[in-house]
Image (cartoon, helix red, strand yellow):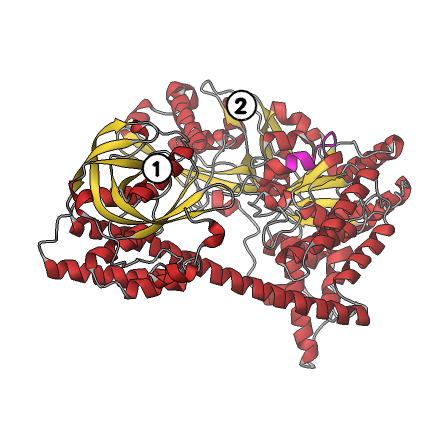
Amino acid sequence: MTEFEDINFDEILGNGFDIVAEEINLSDVDENEKNAEQIVFPILPVRNMVMFPNVVIPITAGRKTSIQLLEEAQQNGDLIGIVSQRNSDIEQPKEKDFYQIGTLAKIIKIIKLPEGNVTAITKGFHRFKIKKITDTQPYFKGEITRLKDSKAKNKEEYEALLENIKDLALKIIELDPNIPNAANFAIKNINNNDDLLNFICTNANFSYVEKQKLLEEKSLMERAKKCYEMMHEDFRKLELRNQIHQKTSKDLDKQQREYFLNQQIRTIQDELGGGPESDVEDLIKKASTKNWKPEVEEHFQKEIARLQRQNPNSPDYNVQRNYLDFFTDLPWETFTKDTFDIEKAEKVLDKAHFGLEDIKKRILEHMAVLKLKNNMKSPILLLVGPPGVGKTSLGKSVADALGRKYVRVSLGGLHDESEIRGHRKTYIGAMAGRILQSIKKSGTSNPVIVLDEIDKVGKGMHGDPSSALLEVLDPEQNNAFYDNFLEMGYDLSKVMFIATANSLSTIQTPLLDRMEVIQIAGYTLEEKIEIAKRHLIKKQQEENGLTSKSFKLGNPELKHIIEAHTSESGVRTLEKRIAAIARWVALQTALVKEYDAKISVEKVDEILGVPRPKSLSELTDVPGVVTGLAWTSVGGDILFIESITSTGKGNLTMTGNLGTVMKESATIALEYIKAKHTELGIEEEDLEKKNIHVHVPEGATPKDGPSAGIAMLTSMVSTFRNKKVRPHLAMTGEITLRGKVLPVGGIKEKLLAATRAGIKEVILCEANRKDVEEIKQDYLKNLKVNYVNWMREVLELAIEK
């Protein structure tokens, strides 16, 4: 046997063998007659490879039995049967461990390798199938049956398919860097189609299991089709791999280029004194001035270290820098000193607000509690009242009285929880919630924050802001308020929260439970006149570029504006009317026209337009019309309830956009009349043969509630009896089916609305007497209040004799 050191590779190559397993066409390597008649051959199981006919391939043997088989076969000039193992991990295979179909091959040359293994250069001849194993020692021998390949019936189709396979093989060789260029040469120089197919099946990048299936295929056409399909899949994988490789190479080239440029930029910035390093230095410098708790300091150091590790040109760098900017801008442990001078606070409130004595008293009590307790765990105030009464400006006055910073947060229309809690900083455009932004804006951790319009917070698809406010407004929880952007707790316990609302009906019960409600009613006529003289006129003169002598409005003119041109609880509309007068004066001044600086009542009507009727008596001067008192979200108001009868069958019709409760009140009133018609002086025939229609004007406005019960009953009785209701009389109260009058709410707002409307007398339930006694008597000096318990008392007071 030839030793490894004695191999003449030039001789081997000269005989047609290439080191990359090209086909070897050796004229002296043929199947002799002895081999042709032989049926028992040595069987050599091989691992991870499959032998095909007419292909030269090297086989490396390491097992002693395999080496012995190869050496004896070469000496005797015998063919050997090469079969593939089913499982390549088995060292000593048995008959069941290898396939039954293989290829007869002849050994051309044996090369002894240094580590003890041998490599045999073999050439395949025929496919065969093992009929039975005749011997297992010292190596396998078996009786075989030679298998013939089935030629293609359509020769042209077969040749075309082989051409496609050849072209695809050349493309694969071009794409795959692991295949040597000599393979390209070998494929181009194989002329026989069958040999070309077997050569490609042998050397293709298929698994040995797939190659075994190709070997077992007796039809050359089917073998070619399957080979072509697998080569296509292999080609697609190679294309994808090359695309990824090219893209990755481009990305790496781009990153290297960017890195080089960044290094140059950093060098230039270092020379100029700017750049990312200066960002970190600035943040550390800002942080050095902060009085932080240990956990806050630890968090900052961790985040600044993360910033230093990031590429300055990456989006994450800007996100992290913005986060740290906000983090260091927050006034951690920075507080303003409170001024608990109650007398000074009282003067500040009196100067900024006329009237509202009860509210001022409650605010001063609140400040006194803070002074004695020296902490903020006192009830959070909720100022509730109609628009224009000064709820928001009261919060500003409280801040001035305490010497604190003032911030207003408008909650009207808010429907995203993130507006309160903030967004996660990883999102694009992320920012902190409005609470922490207000803290940052104020520059202190103990400002006065007015949460304006808290009753108008909505609920959308992004959560419920009202639920997020539960933590903000709870003194037991807000010492560690968690904002999603900040990613750690912030102490809000020193912040003084004052909320404002027009109505309590839309506020969540748990949220309402965390606040102390302070009701603010509207202003009286006298208070509105004083507010106009002290504040509104001066303000509009300044805003319209006028002096204090440009125009004057006396008490009679202001009273006329309030009664004839406004109808509100607050003073917002009054300010608009004064602003209209100020603009008229500004126009006259600009046109250099003469005018009387003392504006008269006639001039007011000329400027503001036609006034509304002052008296309501003509509106109720027919039977069936009653003036009721109502409470709305913008304060108290009056409404008219009218009824009329027509020929029919005793049916009741109700119109005016009425709610369920109000309709029920009308039904109760009619049933009471039917039950007590004799006492009420109403004929039974009228109830049976007349329909009654109840209407509440301003049909576009929804109306509901039980407080119009006595007014509806009075209207029906007035219609059936054809008697008018006394003029300048209004009423409010709920009724029962047996005629009992029940108390209702919003008494102060309703009585103020009555005085604005020129009402001189009202009817209330006896149980509402305590509500009237709490109202300042100056408000009611021109108003007579009648208290009743039963419906019959109402009718005696209301209907004319």
Numbered circle sitting on residue 741: 2
Compare residues 346 and 763 and report the one nearer the observer. Answer: 346
Is 532 situated left or right of 273 in this image?
left
Disc 2 residue crowd, few under 14, some 14–19, many 20+, Cα 10 Å? many
Q: Position of residue 271 (x, y in %)?
A: 81, 71
Q: Residue at point 62% right, 29% down?
A: 510
- Quadrant in the picture for residue 358: top right
Residue 772 visible in image: yes
- Quadrant in the picture for residue 162: bottom left
Judge whether residue 474 is colored magenta: yes
Numbered circle sitting on residue 413: none
Per the image, label 2 sits on a secondary structure element best described as: strand
Residue furthest bottom in the image: 592
Per the image, label 1 sits on a secondary structure element best described as: helix
Q: Which residue is mark 1?
A: 69
Q: Residue at point 27% right, 59% down?
A: 25
Q: Position of residue 14 (x, y in %)?
A: 36, 63
Compare residues 22 and 752 and report the one nearer the observer. Answer: 22
Judge whether residue 71 is colored magenta: no
Q: Residue at point 16% right, 61% down?
A: 159
Q: Is residue 417 above or below residue 529?
A: above
Residue 776 visible in image: no
Q: Position of residue 672 (x, y in %)?
A: 41, 22
Disc 1 residue crowd, few under 14, some 14–19, many 20+, Cα 10 Å? many
